[in-house]
Amino acid sequence: AKEQGRDNFQFYTQELTNSAFERILLETSLRRALDEEDLVLYYQPQISLANGRIIGAEALIRWNHPDMGLIAPNRFIPLAEESGLIVPIGNWVLRTACEQARYWLDIGLPLEKIAVNISGIQVLRGDISKAIKRALNYSRLDPCNLELEITESTLMHEGGQAIASLESLRTLGVELAIDDFGTGYSSLSYLKRLPIDKLKIDRSFINDAATDPNDEAIIRAIIAMGHSLQLKIVAEGVETQQQSEFLQSLGCDVVQGYYYGRPMPAAEFARLFSPVSDD
Ligand code: C2E
Ligand code: CA
Ligand code: CA
Ligand code: CA
């Protein structure tokens, strides 16, 4: 037993050492990635269920690593948040997404919204209003074309502070969406006080809606409740026609998911989005 305990201990420390070492390496190279423009935004179409048209895109970050290739955000955003790097990275995302949207509008694409994910750390530690103002001024994008996605858990952590932060963002004229809705514990009274425009139903509910009657009931409830509060409803993670039809039958406003298109590079999105087909 003693032997085994020792092995466990060794294994454990080794893993810790590795991960601490890896974290330092990763943080250093993430900092470099930001400087050397190895970060890239992919765009996933958002479709209006009222007319089946693309109305916007969600900007999703990737790290284009020189040796490892594309790295998914879940593998580096948490580290960026812990190290504070998320503030300059988030500013880069805002500026790049706004410039991209401005460009698409300039070439005649009927884009209504560019959605950008905002980390709670940006709201708490960065001057998020200033960063947004700067990105809008710099890109000459109309604030009404920018939508900020903030997760439900961020809002819950910030408590009352969140409402003040959101109010100040909303006075800029941008739209606010609650991301991953349904995974936190927002109460109805809390939701009513939030200055928001949209609820984005978490994809875990969409996934199993066809087979799990509980998920179906939750989606129905979120849509009914959201609409009664004058909020638009977006469903993410729509992968099948069946899910899309189900959401349409419930009056969901906007859908997003692999069924309509994966996140893709800007040029590819422009081709898909272009009203003139190029075959
Ligand atoms: P999220 O904001 O909930 O973004 C949706 C994620 O679901 C994306 O993963 C997207 O690729 C994926 N997805 C979209 N449609 C489908 C589908 O039909 N099926 C499945 N299985 N997945 C789908 P991605 O791009 O890996 O991003 C993961 C998370 O990383 C995002 O979750 C968001 O929380 C975070 N993230 C991405 N970009 C940024 C950013 O610029 N800033 C910050 N702070 N966070 C970001
Ligand atoms: Ca999102
Ligand atoms: Ca989400
Ligand atoms: Ca998520």
Image (tube, rainbow, N blue to C red):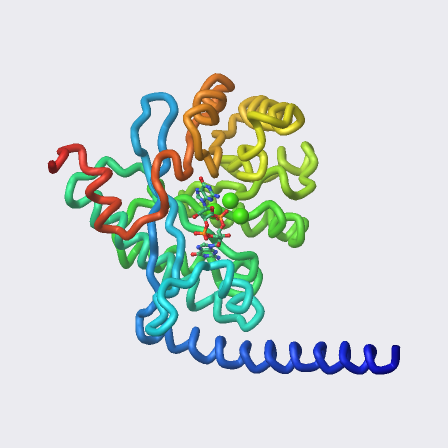
Q: Residue at x 73, y 82 (%)?
A: 10
On the image, which quarter does residue 260 sit in?
Answer: top left
Indicate whether 206 appears above or below 262: above
Is residue 4 found left or right of 60 in the rendered image? right
Q: Residue at x 66, y 43 (%)?
A: 184
Q: Residue at x 66, y 48 (%)?
A: 156
- Please provide percent x and percent y for residue 168: 50, 50
Q: Which image quadrant: the C terminus? A: top left
Q: Residue furthest right?
A: 1
Residue 55 in view: yes
Q: Which image quadrant: the N terminus? A: bottom right
Indicate whether 97 appears above or below 78: above
Residue 113 in view: no
Indicate whether 160 appears above or below 193: below
Residue in the foreground of this view, choosing between 141 and 183: 183
- Please provide percent x and percent y for residue 94: 37, 57
- Please provide percent x and percent y for residue 122: 51, 61
On the image, which quarter does residue 223 sit in?
Answer: top right
Residue in the foreground of this view, choosing between 237 and 135: 237
